[in-house]
Amino acid sequence: MKDIEEYRNKIICGDCLEVMRQMPSESLDLIVTSPPYNLKNSTGNGMKANTKSGKWAGAALQNGYSHHDDCMPHEKYNEWQRNCLTEMFRLIKPNGAIFYNHKWRVQAGLLQDRLEIVEGFPIRQIIIWRRKGGINFNPGYFLPTYEVIYLITKPNFFLAEKANAYGDVWEFTQEMKNDHPAPFPVALIHRIIASTNANLILDPFNGSGTTSVVAKGLKRDYIGIEISPEYCEMAEARLSRNKTNSELLKLQTKPQQLLF
């Protein structure tokens, strides 16, 4: 095991499972993350290889993620994510929490509510992230507009003062000005981090670094793990760009006005 100080305020380029297994137990206050959704292993969303028309034509996710094909067998994907959650849970302190963002879907008539991934973990609450906007290309379905955040906690976790005044349905617009194919909205991550007293925050699927950037803006410490060198560079660039940006301090009151 390595000392947690070797990771503090750094972006680590590597496999998240391998990296997390080298980190000491109960060393983190908070984990905020959203893994790849295994979208290309789906029968119902129209995202097939080389699709040139329809719902996903021209979408960034059509080309997949850098260094991850997002098309694992369903059982293998569930096992991978359970292993990731097991490590995350080991890493948080007795007063720590995990905000694990995922998406429900129906495939071949069966609901994938991610129970196979989260079953057995102490889920305190489910938060619905309602995404503003969107276009529905499928006449057989109502427009999908939400994702699910599982709040998984250790026994001594409590929210920051007055944060319990928020409801459990949060409405934030999807992030549009970001080259990553599926970035977190800045305002969503601000809501999560600012609602806790966490000092050291990990995102093991760091992507373009929104969790790290928001943590820094709120004067918290961060650790980002990302397998893609390309996305690591994005994150480092965003952190560097805002290194002396006084507007970061306004994040607590006007997160929607900040474009990272």
Image: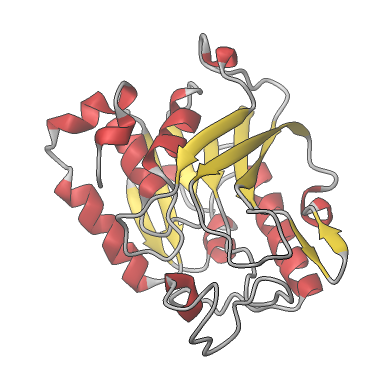
The answer to whether one can see residue 69 in this image is yes
Residue lying furthest right in this view?
Answer: 110
Kindly indicate the quadrant of the structure image that contains residue 59.
Answer: bottom left
Q: Which of these two is toward me, 47 or 65?
A: 47
Check the image and report above or below for 155 versus 57. above
Q: Which of these two is toward me, 55 or 225?
A: 55
In the displayed structure image, the side of residue 122 where residue 203 appears, left or right: left
Residue 57 on image: x %, y %:
47, 78
Kindly indicate the quadrant of the structure image that contains residue 242.
Answer: top left
Residue 234 on image: x %, y %:
28, 62
In the displayed structure image, the side of residue 254 where residue 210 appears, left or right: right
Check the image and report above or below for 223 versus 251. below
Count of all numbered marks drawn on residues in the image: 0
In the displayed structure image, the side of residue 235 where residue 161 appears, left or right: right
Residue 248 on image: x %, y %:
22, 32
Q: Residue at x 35, y 72 (%)?
A: 229
Q: Residue at x 58, y 64 (%)?
A: 36
Q: Residue at x 52, y 58 (%)?
A: 135
Q: Which of these two is toward me, 191 or 94?
A: 191
